[in-house]
Image (cartoon, rainbow, N blue to C red):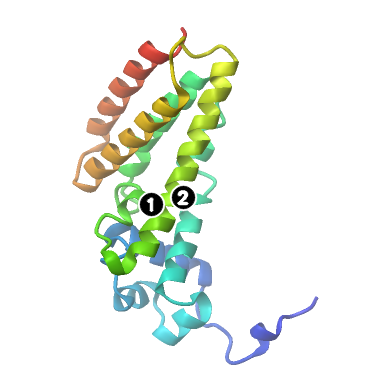
Amino acid sequence: MTTTKAACVGRPRGFDIDLALEQALNVFWRNGYEGTSLSELTEAMGIKKPSLYAAFGNKEQLFFKAIDLYENRPDSLFNIAFQHERVADVIRGLLLGAAAQFTDCSHPQGCALINSTFSCNEASESIKQTVLERKSKHKQRLVDRFELAQNQGELQEGCEPVVLASLMTALFQGLSMQASEGASLDELQKVATMAAEGILTVNVKR
């Protein structure tokens, strides 16, 4: 087995890099990018700043590595909901799944991607724009799924996949904000159920 030169230089890492990244994610998730300091990150990760720079690069690079971790989890909202064959179940899965995941007490409340840019200033504009691009990709996944449902005859005549995707993303943002402000699982499940049933009644063939 070959070993990269970088791995042979200097002292070996004395920390679990995957665990450290998960801890960094939780800090960004809770505080947003702008509200997170390097001191908070190193304290949560249990490492010194030189180790952070060596393993992850600067704060911006660490942030995107953390967001990659968040988006690529096997149990991520889209990964689970998109396993359903019927679009009605996809919609229910997304909204009820958001209610459950955004209020899960094992991590900060809300959506990490949505929370991360709430307070970005002009100095962090590049962060905000990159996050917006990622959100746009998620929205396009919704559009693609709804267009597939339309082609398969599941959607009502007149239903516009792009508009439906915009509605879903607006609901995600609202659910995330309410969860971050302390709404309970029961409260958000009721909201998600009402929203899902309204969407299905108007847009999906029974």
Give the image location of residue 95, x and y in percent.
Answer: 37, 30
Residue at image coords 41%, 54%: 131
Residue at the extreme right of the image, as rendered: 1
Residue at image coords 42%, 70%: 60
Q: Considering only order in the chain, which callout, 1 or 2, is on the residue closer to the N terminus?
A: 1
Residue 127 can be seen in this image: yes
- Up the image or down, 129 lies above or below 181; here it is below
Residue 85 can be seen in this image: no
Give the image location of residue 176, x and y in percent.
Answer: 29, 43
Q: Which amino acid, by three-letter code, is at mark 1? A: Leu
Q: Which amino acid, by three-letter code, is at mark 2? A: Arg
Placement of the N terminus among the 4 image quadrants: bottom right
Give the image location of residue 192, x and y in percent.
Answer: 31, 27
Residue at image coords 51%, 73%: 16
In the image, taking residue 25 as reference, residue 74 lies left or right, namely right
Circles 2 and 1 in contact, beta carbons < 8 Å = yes
In the image, taking residue 176 as reference, residue 168 lies left or right, namely right
Residue receiving disc 1: 113
Residue receiving disc 2: 134
In front here: 16 or 159?
159
